Amino acid sequence: MIRKIEHLGIAVKSLKNSNELIAKLLDRSPYKEEGVESEGVFTSFFKLGETKVELLEATNPDSAIAKFIEKRGEGIHHIALDVVNIEEELNRLESLGFDLIHKSPKPGADGKKIAFLHPKSTNGILVELCEDMEAEE
Ligand code: ZN
């Protein structure tokens, strides 16, 4: 089951500069910063009511974020959906013909299990599914 938009992911060149900009825009500070080594990103998160804004800076030139910025510049990179059972949701979406980048979830930032759908099957939108890790137990 999909519950809500968990966060919007925004690709940025400099987390430091963008943290300052988005802090001014939203009138609040990020509540956490976290690296995800497997993804080659450093992230920060801002709470915004029921949802969040995630800023992502590439930590190496092979990172998906580095490639995205090279092609399209800074901006909205993905929409993350909060789901109750990520494995079940991946099976549901695959059976409907959506193209999965990750067939099974992997650890992401902010204590989540995550998996991405390929934008070619979702109208050009990179969709992330995420589920709280502690929700499993
Ligand atoms: Zn994300």
Image (cartoon, helix red, strand yellow):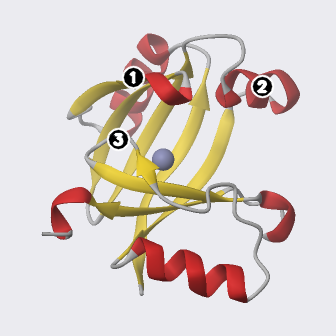
Where 25 sits versus 34, above or below? below
Q: Which quarter of the image is occupied by the C terminus?
A: bottom left
Label pair 2/1, CB-CB below 8 angstroms: no
- On-image quarter of the N terminus: bottom left
Q: Nearer the viewer, residue 107 or 78?
A: 107
Expressed as whole percent of the image width and height from the top left, the position of residue 32 reads 23, 31
At 62% from the left and 56% from the top, the residue drawn is 102
Residue 121, located in which quarter of the rendered image? bottom right
* Residue pointed to by mark 1: 19
Q: Residues within 10 Å of mark 2 (few under 14, many from 20)?
A: some
User: Mark 1 vs mark 3: which is more N-terminal?
Assistant: 1
Q: Nearer the viewer, residue 111 or 81?
A: 111
CA–CA distance in space, label 1 to label 3: 10 Å
Q: Residue at x 62, y 10 (%)?
A: 60
Three-letter amino acid code at the position of disc 1: Asn
In the rendered structure, find residue 26 and report the number of the disc placed on it: 3
Q: Label 2 sits on what residue type?
A: Lys
Q: Which residue is mark 2?
A: 67
The mark that comes first in sequence, 2 or 3, is 3
Residue 20 vertical placement versus 82 (above, below): above
Give above or below for 40 relative to 46.
above
Q: Is residue 29 visible?
A: no
Give residue 13's position: percent from left, percent from top: 61, 16
